[in-house]
Image (cartoon, rainbow, N blue to C red):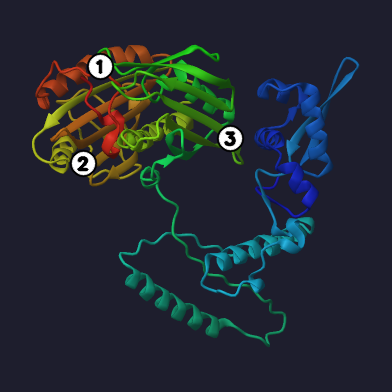
Amino acid sequence: MLDIAVIDDPAAATVALDPVRGRLLAELAAEPASAASLAARLGLPRQKVNYHLRALEAHDLVRETEQRRWGGLTERLFVATAGSYVVSPAALGPVAADPGRTRDRLSAGYLIALAARVVREVGALWRRAVDADRRLATLSIDTEVRFASASERAAFTKDLTLAITTLVARYHNTSAPGGRDYRLLVMAHPGPPTQHERSAMPVKNDAEKRWVELDVIFPGTPEQLWHAMATGPGISAWFTTTTVDAQEGGAIAFDFGDGAVSRGTITAWQPPARLCYEEREWKDGAPPVATEISIRARSGDTCVVRMVHSLFTAEDTWDDELEGFEAGWPGFFEVLRAYLQHFAGQKAAAFRASGVVAGTHHDAWREVSLALGVSGPNVGEHRTTPVDAPTLTGTVERVQQGAKTCEVMLRLDHPAPGIAEIGTYSWGGKARTALSVYFYGDGASEAAAEAEPQWRAWMAKRFPEASPNRRRRERPDMNGGIPPFLRPSA
């Protein structure tokens, strides 16, 4: 099996771009399977799977690896011909992107046309090299650079151009016998927005409603994402304790602790692709909020998840709340990503402990990170809490420090496998800290039951809340771009 295959035949591209066939290719890239086993995995009729497999086989996107006989029947096993696929611009024929037809050499369109030419030319060269069982000599350099200003970007461009011109002049030899021409391309473009930057997208609106939306790529199959985002045990493993009546018209309830429960009704239930629910009493005086979660498979065992929050009002009174929903999810999504990568499908139990710290939230971070043994964190480091704190031991998975929050995520190995989020933030005019812990595996509930009172007692002693009996009866506020897993627990 190739790591990647380039599709330049229009008919093959049409076949591969069918959503069902894309899911079949993703399954068969992982391991060989029969039509019967694929039908069971994807919840499709076997006859329909056979129809799609014949189309994929006819265009060399899958191939037979084995035949098994069961009585008088023969079962064929298939495997994808590549781990992933890319469609060459050659499949578009005369309308394919061509840098020769782009006049503005500084435009994004010209860069895209150059990239398309790379796919077309290298794809064809690689196919010939594979057929001849030879290696194609190529060079790729991929890195990131952050410029402080436009003037620094211009200076970098000048220096890079001079360096490349010097190297080309030194090595370019038009008369060398047996030499070979190479294309050298240097491209630069702005990086995609981070999840926090995407959260700053404006509220959209029409005559009937206002909404925000967020697209995120996660590891896993649609079935794994559906379990994580549409079932009670799955949502509880990375968000908050949740119950789901798995049917249209069923109830969904998010329990945030201390009597704060947000309840809704499921309005669409289409596993494993689409879940919609509506919450009518999420905040006093607010119009109903509808949430739509859609899951779409991508190549390489990944999925795009789109989450849309809509308020059924034409007024902008609640825009801050809408933007707060969108800004609040990225922190939870990082927990979900780690859960899918390391603990997908396992039993889960979670708890949270929080407190108040003197000074700014950066002052709080210095104190809290020292108290918990996570000061100066670097991804990949192994950290353990000091002896005067309850035990947490794990590897640093993520570090996020900004104007509004400071956070560290640990992938735990003790006292149980799991994830811990440690952070500080400013809220309500005070600097606060919070610890959110998710344990996974058969012993998750026992580990959480033992650790939760220890951490709540430690937090109450070390960083006591100003009003320990304070309760909130509504859904936790997500405003201000503060990840809600960092909010106070009482």
- Sequence-earlier tag: 2 or 1: 2
**In-front residue for pair 244/5:** 244
Kindly identify which numbered label has been placed on residue 473. 1
Inter-mark Cα distance, 1 to 3: 35 Å
Q: Quadrant of residue 175?
A: bottom right
Instruction: Report the side of 42 relative to 357 (left or right).
Output: right
Neighbours of disc 2 within 10 Å: few (<14), some (14-19), many (20+): some
Q: Which quarter of the image is occupied by the N terminus?
A: top right
Residue at figure coordinates x 56%, y 20% from the top left? 269
Instruction: Report the side of 479 relative to 252 (left or right).
Output: left
Kindly identify which numbered label has been placed on residue 375. 2
The spot of residue 431 in percent (x, y) is 14, 35
Q: Quadrant of residue 301?
A: top right
Residue at figure coordinates x 60%, y 40% from the top left? 300
Residue type indicated by callout 2: Ser
Using the image, determine if residue 424 lies above or below residue 376.
above
SS class, disc 2: loop
